[in-house]
């Protein structure tokens, strides 16, 4: 029993924390002699000669865009672009064409593509697997593609100086934690505190 307890403590506190992150399998595109594959699955109906990887599971051929190895005919091939990586997030998963914003391959019709822009990107963990991505369009502020209700766009501010995960934001009326208004909070006096 004692040896088992020591082993558990060692694993929890001294084992390499990267091991869990590195064990996550993320399929990739691969061009082979008999066609194009995504992971172990061959992609049917793709034109291998014009195939090109765009980035973050997006690819294209002369006909259309693909996400995760699946054709996405609703995406306008000619105007499609992915948002570039930032200094603190290698893969945002955000893309757009002339009509829509796409997040991880999913069309988000509630966002106005013409006025969309990224505000800031913040990591919640060491590996950047969990992000707080703030953006805006003509209709207001968004967190990870979901609109923050009632926020004042002109005074909106991410409180990331001390608490860099970007979980806390405020405007002149309210303080928010991950997009939810904190009841009873006072924006003028609210501060985040670094306990480390």
Image (cartoon, rainbow, N blue to C red):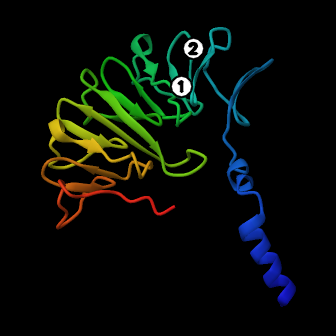
Which residue lies at the image location 52% right of the left edge and 36% below the top edge? 88
> Looking at the image, is mark 2 or mark 1 earlier in the sequence?
2
Q: Name the residue carrying label 1.
A: 66
What kind of element bears circle 2?
loop
Residue positioned 42% across, 10% down in the render: 78
The label on residue 61 is 2
- Does 30 sit left or right of 192 as displayed? right
User: Residue furthest toward the bottom?
Assistant: 1
184 or 109, which is in the foreground? Answer: 184
Residue 187 vs 98, above or below: the answer is: below
In the depicted structure, whether residue 99 falls above or below residue 110: above
Q: Nearer the viewer, residue 146 or 42?
A: 146
Mark 1 surroundings within 10 Å by alpha-carbon count, few (fewer than 14), some (14 through 19), many (20 or more): many
In this image, 3 relative to 24: left or right? right
The answer to whether the residue labelled 2 contacts the one labelled 1, judged by CB atoms less than 8 Å apart, is yes
Q: Residue at x 81, y 17 (%)?
A: 33
In this picture, residue 110 sits left or right of residue 7: left
Q: Which residue is drawn at 39% across and 48% down?
A: 166
Determine whether the residue tagged by mark 1 lies in a helix, strand or loop.
Answer: strand
Marks counted in the figure total 2
Q: Is residue 49 above or below residue 135?
A: above
Which of the 4 quarters of the picture holds residue 68? Answer: top right
Q: Residue 152 location in percent, x, y? A: 14, 43
The quadrant holding residue 35 is top right
Numbered badge on residue 5: none
The residues tagged by marks 2 and 1 sit, at their Cα atoms, a distance apart of 8 Å
Residue 53 spot, x, y in % from top left: 61, 20
- Tell me the quadrant of the picture where the N terminus can be found: bottom right
């Amino acid at each position: 029993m004692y040896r088992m307890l020591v082993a558990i403590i060692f694993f929890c506190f001294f084992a390499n924390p990267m091991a869990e992150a590195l064990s996550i399998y993320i399929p990739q595109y691969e061009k082979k002699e008999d066609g194009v594959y995504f992971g172990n699955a061959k992609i049917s109906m793709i034109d291998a000669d014009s195939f090109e990887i765009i980035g973050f599971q997006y690819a294209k051929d002369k006909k259309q865009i693909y996400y995760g190895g699946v054709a996405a005919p609703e995406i306008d091939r000619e105007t499609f672009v992915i948002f570039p990586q930032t200094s603190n997030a290698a893969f945002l998963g955000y893309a757009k064409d002339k009509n829509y914003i796409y997040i991880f391959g999913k069309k988000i019709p509630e966002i106005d593509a013409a006025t969309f822009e990224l505000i800031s990107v913040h990591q919640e963990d060491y590996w950047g697997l969990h992000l707080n991505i703030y953006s805006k369009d003509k209709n207001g502020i968004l967190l990870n593609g979901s609109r923050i209700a009632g926020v004042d766009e002109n005074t909106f501010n991410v409180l990331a100086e001390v608490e860099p995960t970007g979980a806390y934001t405020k405007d002149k009326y309210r303080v928010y934690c991950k997009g939810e208004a904190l009841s009873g909070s006072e924006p003028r006096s609210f501060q985040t505190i670094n306990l480390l």
